[in-house]
Image: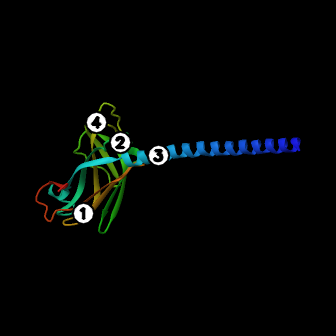
Amino acid sequence: MGIGALIIFIAIILIAAVAALVLITTGGSLQQKALITGTQTEENIASGIEAINVVVSDASLVDPYHTPHAVGDFKIMTRLQSGSAGLNINNTILVVDTETRSFTLTYNRTIDSDDTSSQTGTYLIYYIQKGGGHEDGYINRGDVAKFIFHVFPEIGENQFVRLKMIPRVGSYTQIDFQTPDSMTQRSIMVWPT
């Protein structure tokens, strides 16, 4: 009777030890997954590009071969959102949606003047201000940059336009505006209004 009880007692201790080991391993694994998920979520929420303003230009006022009274040249002044880590522009796309068309643009290169127009399908970056950790092709803390691009065919007067800046990591930025009813100036700030 004593030896049988001792064998049962040892078996119960071994089963409890195995169960404890499984619980500890599972708990550690869940804790690590929760930490990774939390870090990724924080990065996606806190990271992103903040738009400061959007300026459009009527190309027909300087080039008679463009559509009259339509905007084709865009400049979006940007910086990082508060608390955001630096963003790689090579992994950031720009989407321009109108009522009838959609354009998807990718990064082309960094330029030294904001008077340059990009090729259709790409955008350029011009740094207005360079922060302490500046690196071309990135937006880092302290950088203020313009996204410069051209869409063709141009967008006519009184049209709804939605711009989206979508980085690989982080939240995207969406800007909605209406093109002017009549183009009387070469460049017009359309957002914020």
Element type at marker 4? loop
* Type of amino acid at the residue the image marks with label 4: Gly
Q: Which residue is labeled 1 in the image?
A: 155
Closer mark to the observer between disc 1 and disc 2: 2
Residue most extreme to the front:
1
How far, Cα to Cα, is label 3 from label 4? 26 Å
Indicate which disc, 4 or 1, sits on the residue closer to the N terminus. 4
How far, Cα to Cα, is label 1 from label 2? 33 Å
* Type of amino acid at the residue the image marks with label 2: Ser
* Type of amino acid at the residue the image marks with label 1: Ile
- Left or right: residue 10 versus residue 121 is right
* Type of amino acid at the residue the image marks with label 3: Gly
Q: Which residue is labeled 4 in the image?
A: 142
Q: Circle 1: is it few (<14), some (14-19), or many (20+) Cα within 10 Å?
A: many
Indicate which disc, 4 or 2, sits on the residue closer to the N terminus. 2
The correct choice, above or below, for 98 with respect to 45 in the image is below
Q: Nearer the viewer, residue 114 or 161?
A: 161
Q: Are marks 3 and 1 in contact (CB under 8 Å)?
A: no
Q: Nearer the viewer, residue 162 or 169?
A: 169
The correct choice, above or below, for 192 with respect to 86 in the image is below
Q: Position of residue 27 (x, y in %)?
A: 59, 44
Q: Which mark is residue 84?
A: 2
Residue appearing at x 31%, y 46% in the figure: 124
- Left or right: residue 75 versus residue 94 is left
Residue appearing at x 64%, y 45% in the figure: 23
Element type at marker 3? helix
